[in-house]
Image (tube, rainbow, N blue to C red):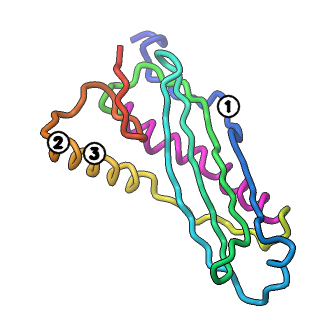
Amino acid sequence: MSDQNQPFFSIQRAYLKDLSLEQPNSPAIFLEQEMPTVEVQLDVAAERLNEHVFEVAVIATVTAKIQDKVAFLVEGKQAGIFEIRNVPVEQLDPLIGIACPTIVYPYLRANVADAISRAGFQPIHLAEVNFQALYEQRLAQLAEQQAANGETPAPGIVMPDGSSAQTH
C-alpha cells in the first residue's frame, strides 16, 4: 500500500469564525449583588468544502441573567478546517462529528471565557463536553425523525447538523 492510500487526518486551521457580546442592562447590572444564573447552549455544524476538506464548527451561546435581567449574552462560533483522506466512509462521519469538535472546542472555551472577562464579569469556563455522546444522541434523534416521516436514511455522510453529504 503506497503512502497515497494511507488514511490521513489533519487540522489545517483553527479560527474564531464569529463572536458577539451583548450587555443590554449595563452599567446598572454591575450594581446588582445577586449571582447570575447561567444557561449554555451548544451545537455542532459541519460543511464539506471539497472532496477531502471539511469545516467543522462548535457554536456556544452563554446567557447570564440576574432575576429577569440579562447581564450578558455571548455567542461564539469556533471552527476548524480539516483535511481527511482515505478514511472508510463508515469512519468519516464519526470523525467529523466527534473528533473534529473535540479538537476545536478548547479554543471556543478560551475565547468565550476571555470575552466574558473582558466584558467585566467573572469568566465562565464552559464544561468539558462528551462529543461522542452528543453525536450518538443526534443520530438517534435523526433516526426517530426519519422513522416518524416514513423515510429511509439518506445515503452518504450524516453531518453533525443533520444534513447529508454525498461521498465520492
Q: In this view, does 36 lie above or below 152?
A: below
Q: Which of the marked residues, 1 or 3, is nearer the chain's N terminus?
A: 1
In three-dimensional space, the C-alpha distance between marks 2 and 1, rounded to whole angstroms, equals 38 Å
Q: What residue type is labelled 2?
A: Asn
Say which amino acid is labelled 1: Arg
Of badges 2 and 1, the one in the foreground is 2
* Main SS of residues in magenta: helix
Residue at image point 35% right, 19% down: 167
| Secondary structure of the residue carrying numbered label 1 | strand
Figure quadrant of residue 134:
bottom left
What residue is pinned by disc 2? 149
Q: Is residue 96 magenta?
A: yes
Q: In this view, does 19 lie to the left or right of 144?
A: right
Disc 1 crowd, CA 10 A, few/some/many (<14, 14-19, 20+):
few
Q: Position of residue 51 (x, y in %)?
A: 46, 15
Mark 3 residue type: Leu
Q: Residue at x 73, y 61 (%)?
A: 113
Residue at 37%, 34% in the rendered image: 163
Q: Nearer the viewer, mark 3 or mark 2?
A: 2
Check disc 3 and report the residue beneath it.
142
User: x, y (%) of residue 127?
Assistant: 58, 66
Give the Cα distance between marks 1 and 3.
30 Å
The disc, 2 or 1, on the residue closer to the chain's N-terminal end is 1
Q: Nearer the viewer, residue 62 or 15?
A: 62
Residue located at (35% from left, 33% from top): 91
Expressed as whole percent of the image width and height from the top left, the position of residue 162 reads 37, 39
Measure the alpha-carbon separation of dots 3 and 2. 11 Å
| Residue under pointer 1 | 13
Residue 80, image x and y in percent?
Answer: 61, 35
Residue segment shown in magenta: 92-117
Name of the residue lying farthest toward the left: 150
Q: Which of marks 3 and 2 is nearer the N terminus?
A: 3
